[in-house]
């Protein structure tokens, strides 16, 4: 697929103007490798040596050799002379199909040896000549295909990433987002440092790191593609000094420790990478909001019919997002409450989502929710227009799947403004503070008439009279960053560790 960019300004008055000069004919793009192999094939078929052809066209044999090897593109005059000397036409010399199987293999091998993949291997190039055995050509091209196939398997395309995310979300729903194995590991760690109640302070977290055999180092040159770096050789964890990250520094450290406690190995694929992220996030939350203490807090709130995410946040000194996540871990298992969660960008795109209460999230054919636009009538979208940013916004929404009550807040970050929304089916709203709200909305999504299709009055006024210039999202065309840890520059990380290993 080819993409073309236009930088010249176009004026409607000049379109189809009779005074406009005709556009020049597009130049033919010459495949010099194929053409060179075709010249060699026709020369040998005619029984000519390079010297013979050189004499016929008036060009040095060395120059003809460069042309045959695809290293020089002949000018049109020389191309005409070559065609005449070889008894063919220019079209035949520039033809798309190689003259025979051997020529096709030679062309493919030559192209491969000039590719970035081959260059990255630092291997010597094979001299392609008539003396190179056919079986060697077949083997080399076969190896090329297999190497490309394996490299392609290691690259997660956006579709593969969405599919892996969809599969992970289905597994989380099946388990009600509750993982007793991670709860147990967190309990062991907390017991080892004697923490039983109250917010998890930085001092206690340092004790946890020490108990696990790690020293903590705050640096100003942490690799830009990382939130933390763990040196397993010297048992060090490096964290950033400044407030560069939107993330709670306690969570960042606890997630780093989580990889060690949970025995993670290098991810083998993108799905494995995502599962490890979920596991370490869960482990960190289980330390910040211990299961027993948090469940007791929630049960008291349920009895009083005063469950509120902001109360969880304040009681355990965590972010609203962490409190909301932790509620989804424990609500179904311990409170018999089914729920859903959304993190939605102000643009309307869902960044994170979870549900086990039957709410109908938008999703693509792979089952992925993230990256889809949320309904404009849902609480997660309406909250952006609410003037009161201090209090939680509560709303009932009637949907084709039933009526849901949701509570939401907005928070700013380096990536823009987000809403964080937690909701439950109507039958279970009686346990929550904010159930008395009079705010109500209706959503019929995925029906396009709900919020995707413009109202008839606006359509009548503006259809055919608007031409927006779309913001290009070129990252949507790219593959996911390659490597075991997508997006991380390993050279940068290793150089960082080497620089700090002697300190």
Image (cartoon, rainbow, N blue to C red):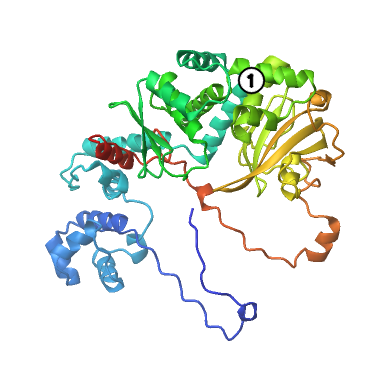
- Residue pointed to by mark 1: 294
Q: Residue at x 75, y 50 (%)?
A: 387
Q: Taking 331 as reference, is 368 above or below it?
A: below
Q: Residue 471: which quarter of the image?
A: bottom right
Comparing 159 with 377, the one in front is 377
Q: Taking 265 as reference, is 485 above or below it?
A: below
Q: Residue at x 39, y 33 (%)?
A: 484
Q: Residue 341: which quarter of the image?
A: top right
Q: Position of residue 298 (x, y in %)?
A: 70, 20
Q: Is residue 295 left or right of residue 253?
A: right
Comparing 53 with 11, the one in front is 11
Q: Taking 84 as reference, is 395 above or below it?
A: above
The residue positioned farthest toward the left in the image shown = 51
Q: Is residue 104 left or right of residue 286?
A: left
Res 175 visible: no
State the SS at label 1: helix
Q: Position of residue 143 (x, y in %)?
A: 29, 35
Mark 1 Cα-neighbour bin, 10 Å: few <14, some 14–19, many ≥20:
some
Q: Residue at x 75, y 65 (%)?
A: 464
């Amino acid at each position: 697929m080819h993409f073309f960019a236009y930088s010249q300004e176009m004026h409607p008055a000049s379109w189809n103007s009779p005074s406009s000069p005709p556009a020049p004919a597009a130049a033919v793009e010459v495949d010099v490798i194929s053409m060179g192999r075709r010249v060699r094939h026709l020369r040998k078929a005619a029984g000519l040596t390079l010297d013979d052809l050189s004499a016929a066209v008036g060009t040095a044999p060395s120059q003809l050799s460069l042309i045959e090897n695809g290293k020089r593109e002949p000018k049109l005059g020389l191309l005409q002379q070559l065609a005449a000397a070889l008894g063919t036409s220019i079209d035949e010399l520039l033809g798309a199909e190689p003259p025979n199987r051997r020529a096709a293999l030679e062309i493919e091998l030559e192209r491969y040896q000039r590719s970035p993949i081959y260059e990255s291997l630092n291997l010597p190039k094979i001299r392609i000549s008539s003396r190179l055995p056919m079986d060697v050509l077949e083997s080399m091209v076969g190896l090329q295909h297999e190497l490309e196939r394996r490299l392609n398997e290691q690259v997660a395309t956006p579709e593969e990433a969405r599919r892996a995310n969809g599969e992970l979300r289905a597994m989380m729903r099946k388990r009600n987002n509750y993982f007793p194995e991670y709860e147990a590991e967190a309990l062991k760690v907390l017991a080892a440092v004697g923490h039983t109640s109250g917010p998890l302070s930085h001092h206690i977290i340092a004790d946890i790191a020490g108990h696990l055999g790690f020293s903590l180092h705050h640096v100003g040159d942490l690799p830009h593609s990382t939130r933390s770096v763990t040196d397993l050789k010297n048992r060090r964890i490096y964290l950033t000094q400044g407030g560069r990250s939107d993330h709670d520094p306690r969570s960042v450290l606890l997630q780093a420790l989580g990889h060690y406690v949970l025995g993670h190995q290098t991810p083998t694929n993108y799905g494995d990478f995502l599962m490890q992220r979920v596991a370490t996030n869960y482990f960190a939350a289980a330390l910040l909001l211990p299961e027993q203490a948090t469940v007791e807090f929630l049960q008291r709130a349920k009895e009083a019919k005063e469950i509120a995410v902001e109360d969880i946040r304040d009681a355990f000194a965590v972010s609203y997002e962490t409190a909301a996540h932790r509620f989804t871990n424990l609500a179904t298992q311990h409170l018999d409450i089914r729920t859903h969660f959304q993190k939605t960008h102000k643009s309307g795109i869902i960044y994170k989502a979870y549900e086990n209460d039957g709410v109908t999230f938008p999703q693509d054919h792979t089952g992925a929710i993230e990256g889809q636009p949320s309904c404009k009538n849902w609480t997660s979208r309406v909250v952006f227009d609410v003037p009161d940013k201090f209090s939680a916004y509560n709303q009932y929404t009637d949907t084709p799947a039933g009526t849901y009550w949701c509570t939401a807040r907005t928070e700013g970050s380096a990536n823009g403004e987000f809403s964080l929304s937690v909701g439950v089916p109507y039958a279970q709203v009686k346990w929550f503070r904010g159930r008395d709200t009079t705010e109500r909305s209706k959503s019929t999504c995925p029906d396009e008439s709900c919020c995707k299709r413009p109202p008839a009055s606006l359509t009548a006024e503006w259809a055919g009279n608007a031409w927006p210039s779309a913001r290009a999202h070129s990252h949507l065309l790219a593959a996911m960053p390659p490597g075991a840890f997508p997006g991380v520059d390993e050279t940068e990380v290793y150089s960082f560790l080497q620089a700090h290993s002697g300190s």
